[in-house]
Image (tube, rainbow, N blue to C red):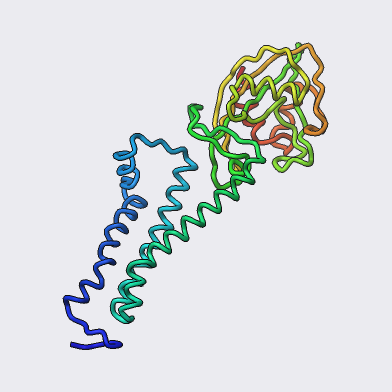
């Protein structure tokens, strides 16, 4: 029998001292399997006791992030317990194998609580968008900054209107140079986000009124598609309409606007005149009509 700092080591007491670590290994395996295995065991167990749980993509991402943090906290604590069992005093081992884990978990959850409170204060001042799946069904919600941060890639709905005059010319708007996305490029007649709690048709009417001052028009739905850029992912609902009115642009949002013939548009395609989104939509939806 050997001793370190007066602590005798026997097979019996060393097993007793590493027992907390062995129990935590089970938790570590469950978390690890939920993270990297074929099934999220923690979610399955939660559904068993709390009923059916449905998470939107951002909530799933947050849950995975928290599980990963808890995995590494638990792994680090296991190593500390093993080290204290072999090389530290009984008092140190008692603290590390017991109270320390609760302190580490508590500190992490306190950090999450404070982070959520701070974010909520900031997000409350922002626009909130619905988060949807590829079919357009709402699966959650998120603030503008999260949808546009280039990381979340949360799919959110937008509306586009392609406005024609009786001569068949298409009205285009030139994006303001102050825009953070595609400044100074010619773009769809009207385009904008769908607000939280707003129907597609309501969003379209609101955006048309705000951007070009038209309140009476009959939109025709021509299709929807997913548009993805380095900044965001949008589910675009595209419409066309014919007007006898002269659009009156909002100078705070748009530099200028005018009607273009299809010949003019075709001659400028691929020359960095239009936004990539408009070029795709013109080619795929409008030219084929």
| Horizontal and vertical percent position of residue 287 | 64, 22
Q: Which of 67 and 85 is in front in this view?
A: 85
Q: Relative to residue 269, is residue 138 drawn left or right?
A: left
Give the image location of residue 56, x and y in percent.
Answer: 46, 38
Q: Nearer the viewer, residue 42 or 245?
A: 42
Question: Foreground residue, 77 or 185?
Answer: 77
* For residue 32, above or below residue 242: below
Q: Please say whether residue 99 is visible from this viewpoint.
A: yes
220 with respect to 246 (left or right): left
Residue 108 against residue 6 in the figure, above or below? above
The residue that appears at 34% across and 38% down in the rendered structure is: 50
Residue depicted at x 27% and y 88%: 6
Q: In which quarter of the image is the C terminus?
A: top right
With respect to residue 76, does 172 lie above or below?
above
Q: Position of residue 263 (x, y in %)?
A: 74, 23
Quadrant housing the N terminus: bottom left
Taking the image as drawn, is residue 287 in sight? no
Q: Quadrant of residue 197?
A: top right
Which residue corresponds to the image point at 71% horizontal and 40% vertical from the top-left?
Answer: 182
How many numbered circles are shown? 0
Residue at the image position 50 percent from the left and 35 percent from the top: 140
Residue 213 horizontal/vertical position (percent): 78, 20
């Amino acid at each position: 029998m050997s001793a370190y700092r007066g602590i005798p080591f026997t097979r019996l007491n060393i097993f007793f001292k590493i027992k907390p670590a062995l129990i935590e290994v089970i938790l570590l395996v469950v978390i690890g399997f939920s993270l990297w295995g074929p099934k999220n065991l923690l979610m399955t167990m939660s559904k068993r006791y709390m009923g059916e749980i449905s998470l939107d993509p951002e909530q799933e991402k947050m849950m995975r992030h928290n599980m990963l943090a808890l995995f590494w906290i638990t792994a680090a604590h296991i190593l500390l317990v093993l080290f204290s069992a072999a090389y530290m005093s009984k008092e140190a081992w008692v603290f590390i194998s017991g109270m320390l884990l609760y302190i580490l978990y508590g500190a992490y959850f306190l950090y999450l609580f404070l982070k959520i409170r701070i974010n909520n204060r900031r997000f409350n001042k922002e626009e909130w968008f619905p988060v949807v799946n590829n079919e357009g069904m709402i699966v959650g919600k998120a603030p503008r900054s999260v949808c546009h941060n280039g990381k979340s890639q949360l799919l959110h709905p937008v509306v586009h209107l392609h406005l024609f005059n009786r001569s068949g010319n298409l009205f285009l708007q030139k994006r303001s140079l102050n825009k953070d996305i595609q400044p100074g490029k010619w773009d769809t007649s009207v385009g904008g986000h769908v607000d939280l709690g707003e129907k597609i048709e309501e969003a379209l009417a609101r955006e048309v009124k705000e951007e070009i001052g038209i309140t009476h028009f009959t939109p025709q739905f021509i299709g929807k598609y997913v548009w993805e850029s380095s900044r965001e992912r949008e589910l675009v609902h595209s419409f066309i309409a014919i007007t006898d009115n002269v659009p009156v642009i909002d100078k705070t949002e748009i530099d200028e606007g005018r009607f273009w013939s299809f010949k003019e548009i075709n001659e400028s395609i691929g020359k960095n005149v239009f936004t990539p989104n408009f070029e795709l939509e013109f080619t795929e939806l409008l030219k084929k009509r």
